[in-house]
Image (spheres, helix red, strand yellow):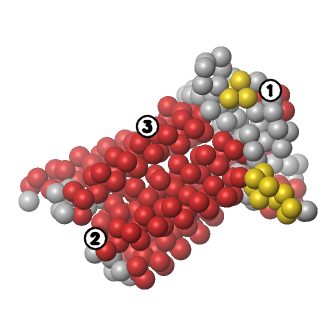
């Protein structure tokens, strides 16, 4: 595809970095646009966004390092240097989600904001931003699919793409686009349900739990079509699939618990 948008001298504008930045911007603009209707001040949300984004990026990189540590080099120094050199690539979404969510809840509580209501506001934005990020993955060639003969295949030929040299010129599943499309559908569904949440027709926290369940199901399915290194398999499943299954079950339990408590009132 197009791992580099353009190059001017030694300066390169990577497609992945640009699309991730666009994703963050789209998510932030969405949150700020809905802030008033949700009863939040933009100043409070600014700090919430800042700490969530920084922690999310750190968590995503740490999870990547933990998952692929042995493959990054022969010793600690070589692995650490590799992580620094390739900082624009190599992130694990669930690591970002866990660390970002932790920072989000801590900062929301520190500011005495309604945590679950804020989480519902951020849930659609997260899906929207993630869709942009996966398009960035597609342009860069990372997170690619496995070989396929289906009509929707895509072939990477640029040596600069984050695709194994053995798979250059081979038709692959556009797994990144599958996930981007799935995230967009999740965004539209959550955005349509947001007014019900803000009006009190849904228990606070329901949209956040619904996002977690829907994304976990999406990721679990797309993982079967991935062709990049998925880490060590357990029970025939990748680490991301095991996390997805756990998140899905926890999210379903949270949805039923919220619904039961809401109906008792």
Looking at marks 2 and 3 on the same chain, the residue that comes earlier in the sequence is marked by: 2
Tell which tag, 3 or 1, sits nearer the viewer. 1
Looking at marks 2 and 1 on the same chain, the residue that comes earlier in the sequence is marked by: 2
Residues at badges 2 and 3 in contact (C-beta under 8 Å)? no
The percent coordinates of residue 75 (x first, y second) are: 87, 53
Front residue of 102 and 130? 130
Tell which tag, 2 or 3, sits nearer the viewer. 2
Q: Secondary structure at mark 1?
A: loop
Query: What residue is shown with label 2?
Result: 37
Whole-Å distance between the Cαs marked 2 and 1? 50 Å
Query: What residue is shown with label 3?
Result: 217
Residues at badges 2 and 1 in contact (C-beta under 8 Å)? no
Looking at marks 3 and 1 on the same chain, the residue that comes earlier in the sequence is marked by: 1
Residue at the far top: name it. Answer: 149
The percent coordinates of residue 117 (x first, y second) are: 30, 66
Q: Is residue 199 visible?
A: yes
Q: Secondary structure at mark 3?
A: helix
């Amino acid at each position: 595809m197009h791992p580099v948008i353009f190059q001017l001298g030694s300066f390169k504008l990577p497609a992945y970095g640009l699309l991730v930045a666009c994703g963050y911007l789209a998510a932030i603009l969405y949150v700020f646009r809905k802030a008033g209707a949700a009863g939040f001040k933009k100043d409070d949300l600014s700090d919430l966004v800042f700490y969530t984004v920084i922690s999310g990026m750190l968590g995503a990189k740490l999870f990547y390092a933990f998952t692929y540590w042995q493959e990054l080099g022969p010793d600690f120094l070589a692995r650490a240097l590799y992580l620094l050199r390739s900082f624009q690539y190599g992130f694990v979404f669930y690591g970002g989600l866990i660390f970002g969510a932790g920072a989000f809840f801590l900062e929301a509580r520190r500011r005495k904001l309604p945590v679950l209501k804020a989480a519902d506001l951020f849930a659609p934005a997260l899906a929207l931003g993630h869709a942009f990020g996966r398009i960035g993955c597609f342009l860069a060639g990372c997170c690619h699919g496995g070989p396929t003969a289906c009509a929707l295949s895509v072939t990477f030929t640029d040596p600069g793409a984050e695709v194994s040299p053995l798979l250059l010129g081979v038709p692959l599943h556009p797994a990144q686009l599958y996930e981007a499309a799935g995230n967009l559908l999740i965004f539209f569904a959550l955005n349509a349900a947001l007014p019900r949440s803000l009006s009190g027709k849904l228990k606070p926290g329901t949209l956040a739990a619904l996002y977690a369940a829907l994304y976990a199901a999406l990721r679990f399915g797309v993982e079967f079509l991935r062709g990049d290194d998925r880490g060590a398999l357990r029970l025939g499943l990748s680490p991301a699939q095991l996390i997805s299954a756990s998140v899905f079950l926890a999210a379903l339990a949270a949805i039923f618990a919220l619904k039961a408590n809401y109906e008792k009132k």
